[in-house]
Amino acid sequence: MMGNVAMAEGALAAGLDFFGGYPITPSTEAIEHLAKRLPEVGGCCMQMEDEIASINAVIGASVVGAKSMTATSGPGLSLMTETISMAANLEIPFVFCDVQRIGPGSAGPVTDPHHNDIGLIRFSGHGEFQVIALAPMNCQELFDLTITAFNFAETYRCPVYILSDAYLGHLHEAVYIPPKEEIIKGIVTRELPTDFSKKFSYFDEISGKYIIPKPPIMGTDYSPIMFLHQPHNYEGITSPKSLEFMEMLIEKIKSNMDKISITKEYKLEDAEIIIISYGLPVRTSYRAVDIARKEGIKVGLLRIVTIWPFPDEKVKGIVKNAKVVIVPELNYTGYIAEQVERVTNLETPIIKIPKVGIFHHPDDILKVIREVSK
Amino acid sequence: MSGIGPMYPTEKPDHPYVQLSMSGHLLGKYSSRFCAGCGYGMIGHIFTRVFEDEKLDPKLFPVVIGIGCYSQLLLLIHHASQKFLALHGRAPAMATGIKMANPKLKPIVFSGDGDCLGIGGNHFIHICRRNVDCVILVFNNSIYGMTGGQGAPTTLFGAHSTTTPYKMFENRSDSMKLALAAGASYVARTTVAHPRTFMKYFRKALKHKGTSVIEVITPCVTYFGRKNLDSLGAENLGIKGEKMDDTGKMIDWIRRNCIRINQSKLMSENELFNKYVIGEFRFEPDKPEYSEEYAKIIKLAMEEK
């Protein structure tokens, strides 16, 4: 199954009701597949007139209670950021699949991968908010993590990104789709709450944690009178306490880091050299670690699946005893390497292995490992 | 004559619709944020009145509001209606999403001339093309009021604004022609000087299945009237004109500058220059509606599965 199709099937399994999209290489297969499959399950797939319209239609659908998503690439994401900011401030849940490609423009090698939206999605828009971003590394994970993304969106009411890329989106791999009954067990549905009295409380005084009410649905009783795209209280009236509102938008996710943050460790127990990676370069890194271990070099791999919010504590704990940290990334800037630098206070040397438009070969990473271990 | 304004008795009885507005519901009295002489108060009142008289279910008629002075209408219109303040120009796209995700709803879109014909022109064209079931109210005051009187796509030729200080020299865009070409099934234009006609058109649009576009010409005294002469639109008569610096003059000008659609058919292009043609341009109740057509596609897909 192709990566984009696996993502689309994952969304269908999670109960997708509305898809609004605009064709853009390399994400086009998602809308093509859903245009065929969504009507079969009673949903609606629309090809809108542009990316701005598609994200607005997605938000509109989400407001009336449909599980909705869109899929696009970097140029589309740039157009959509205004609406994403609005949706994040209104706490409207939606899922966003970003199939990243090279280059800022429309022409050029658009089917080559380039993890260049990592910074944009975190700092996008003109409001303050925290997003969740998941980086799968194969088609199976595209399927599984899309379901997880929908659950996160419904639970935490924030934009949830799936960071695919041009290679991953076009990769054909076997995908195991579990039986329907098994999938349904783990899905967070959009039902109306039974207890309306608690809908205004965001802060639980006993546990000291933020609680997130179910998303309101327009066209039912459980809806504010007004939706305004600025800090608001539950009635929809602009709240003068903007600072508290911003704190709530960010802390509702940060205080649930234990549930949101997904990381995977590989041979880290006695590792002196640590590779930190996400997305496609993880596949190469696994191979590099295996070969280096055979040569007797103590290398380990920390794989970050939830890249935003960045797992500060986890990385800090693992990097503490490391001699050196290697961060292979499919971009020159090294967005995640910068985060590691921030977490480690520049105490541990960090080596970036940048690549743009082309996959890392295990030798690229092995060469660095061998040099460092000398 | 028009400068005097209406006279009220000193002790006014309570207006029967005051309690229905948002401010009336919360505070018990009518208040608005609009400038003196603005037409939006009237539009908000007409909306509330139709909403109440027709006994519309607020849950079935969500109101999607664009950005402009009229965004403040959400504090004014019927308190029970569910309102969504969309982004600048994106209200039609959002209404499409709302309608398609829940076809039982019929969104009512509030939109302005800058919102609908400027930044959101593309979305406006495509919602008309799809014939999605909704009501789009385009409030045309020929100016960007909220940002302080800049030129709009609808500003009349020769008019003054802050970004066209000498005179407006661009061609004017006509939402009616745009909607007709794009394929909206109910297209009509009226003004706040004809409130009963507006109510009639609005009622008709609520019952109609398909995209209804109603343009409402509304006065902006503060930024349009004060800067322009009432000889605008009557250039060929060669009169000097005077500044339209109060509501009466502006309403008078709107009335004078409107040509009924039947009458306009006998007039040349030159005579219609800088004038507003009012009336019903198109009413096609049988045109296929998008969500109904999509329901057929869903049925087809389920059968083929």
Image: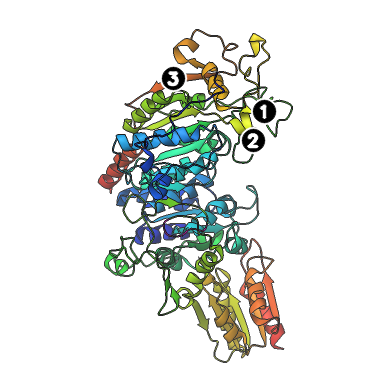
Chain of the residue that carries numbered disc 3 in the rendered image: B
Residue visible at 33% across and 43% down?
A: B105
Contact check, label 1 and label 2, Cβ < 8 Å = yes
Which residue is tagged 3?
B279
What span is in magenta? A231-235
Residue B91 among magenta residues: no
Q: Which mark is residue B149?
A: 2
Vertical arrangement, residue A363 with respect to residue B30, above or below: below
Q: Is A179 left or right of A242, judged from the image as shown?
A: left
Q: Quadrant of residue A191?
A: bottom left
Instruction: Return the residue nearer the eye: A253 or A42.
Output: A253
Instruction: Return the residue nearer the eye: B125 or B207.
Output: B207
Residue visible at 63% across and 17% down?
A: B231
**Do callouts 3 and 1 point to residues on the same chain?**
yes
Magenta stretch, overall SS = loop
Q: Earlier in the sequence, mark 3 or mark 2?
A: 2
